[in-house]
Image (cartoon, helix red, strand yellow):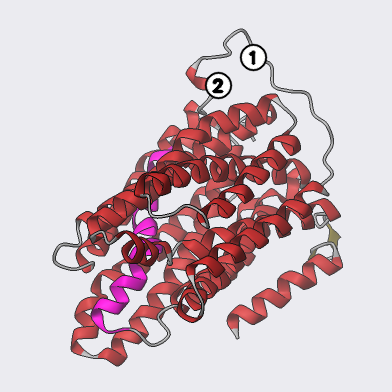
Amino acid sequence: MCFYGTSIIFLQYCINGCWMDGDIMKEKLFTSSYILICLANFLTSFSFFLLVPTLPFYIVDKYKVDASMVGLLLSCYVVAVLCIRPFAGFVADFFQRKKVYVISYVLFAISFAVYLPIGESLLAFVLLRVFHGFAFGALNTTGNTLVIDIMPSSRRGEGLGYFGVTNNLAMAFGPMAGLFLISKYSYDILFITALLAALIGLTLAAGIKVKKRQPAATGGKLLSIDRFFLLEGIPASIAFFMLAIPYGMTSSYIAIYAEQIGVVRGAGLFFTVQAAGLIVSRLVSGRLVDKGLITQTIVRGIFIAMLGVTGEGLLSFVAGYSLNLGYILYFLSAFLLGYGFGTIFPAFNTLFINMAPHSRRATANATYLTGWDVGIGAGMLLGGALSVNGYYESFVFGAILVVAALVYFRIYVSGHFERHRLC
């Protein structure tokens, strides 16, 4: 009901075309282009999340590898995304962003078609995952910047929050749909569904209208490191990296972890409950960010996420004592994790954008997302490596990292942001 209600609220905002704050009408947010990019982003994320919980099973079934190897194979995708982010941000700052976005979407869609004839070659699978990672990294970086160009600056936090809701809706439906498809049909049907979603998203993306902008000036330093990374944002990127590690562990291993400890009924609903938490938080956190409470919102989100990851770490012990309590903690952890990260995402994104001039927004987004990608990849690797005695060890380690990220952000990153913010 919570998920259904928040979905209806979001659609009502789209229909009304505005948000009423008392008697004050703010700048129009829900233009046709904003709605199109949100729908295209939903389909990008939906096709992506179809594969997140299912690829570990696919790799084990098809290539007969152990748990540690699964983590290594999954991480090659994230490494590819990581490698392309800085270059994608650079290109999106120096060329028209819509063109870069559409070209990236074409490559992203093509990737799904190649899964079908890939055959039994493990090397071919790895190369495909690398190519797919390149396409997704460029698409995601450019899309996150293009939506900022479309929305009014006075409603950036709110707009990013709703844009993020499309990711969360995809997170709710994608993993559940993916697990259903492989249980009732086949992996081929899974990949065909992902391909169709990507093609529809590409069609919507082609209809986006955005004003042409002047490319960023090179200033004679075309190949300097600050053309590819927002140096002022690196401290915040480190905090984001620490937070992404337990998130990467959850995305890749929570289904297998639940199966190990006996939480098998409705295990796929974890992602739906998590998405509900993400959606509820987005409807609140974006408005707090627009009121200037950026660092305060992040601290609150990290604390809530810490409770969720801690619950995951304790899940094995609680389920061993009482399976019913295990189910309660399983879904409570999902909601807290979703609510915490849903609070963090738009606030962190705004923090990076506020430290960059308009001409370097894509570079700022690339730096923001690079920290996330490195953490997700590390989470996939560590989640497998630390699971020798059970996945609970991985999630306990993740909880410790979230505590460390909270302390680091509160002590250092908050002050650094205030000293370097441009708006």
Query: Where residue 197 appears, x then y in whole percent?
Result: 66, 62
Return the residue nearer the eye: 385 or 270: 385
Q: Secondary structure at mark 1?
A: loop
Q: Residue at x 39, y 45 (%)?
A: 126
Q: Is residue 309 visible?
A: yes
The residues bearing labels 1 and 2 have C-alpha atoms spaced at a distance of 8 Å
Q: Residue at x 40, y 41 (%)?
A: 79
Q: Residue furthest left?
A: 389
Most frequent secondary structure within the magenta stretch: helix
Query: Where residue 129 appears, x then y in whole percent?
Result: 45, 47
In the rendered view of the protein, which quadrant contains the N terminus?
bottom right
Q: Is residue 253 magenta?
A: yes
Q: In this image, 396 relative to 376: left or right?
A: left
Q: Is residue 240 visible?
A: no
Query: Where residue 24 appears, x then y in whole percent?
Result: 84, 60
Q: In this image, 116 relative to 264: left or right?
A: right
Residue 320 against residue 25 in the figure, above or below? below
Q: In this image, 160 relative to 16: left or right?
A: left
Circle 2 is placed at which residue position? 227
Return the residue nearer the eye: 409 or 250: 250
CB under 8 Å between discs 1 and 2: yes
Q: Is residue 195 magenta?
A: no
Q: Residue at x 77, y 45 (%)?
A: 150
Return the residue nearer the eye: 179 or 308: 179
Query: Where residue 109 appears, x then y in whole percent?
Result: 63, 50
The magenta segment: 236-263
In the rendered view of the protein, which quadrant contains the C terminus?
top right
Report how many numbered discs are placed on residues in the image. Answer: 2
Q: Earlier in the sequence, mark 1 or mark 2?
A: 1
Residue 146 against residue 363 in the figure, above or below? below
Circle 1 is placed at which residue position? 218
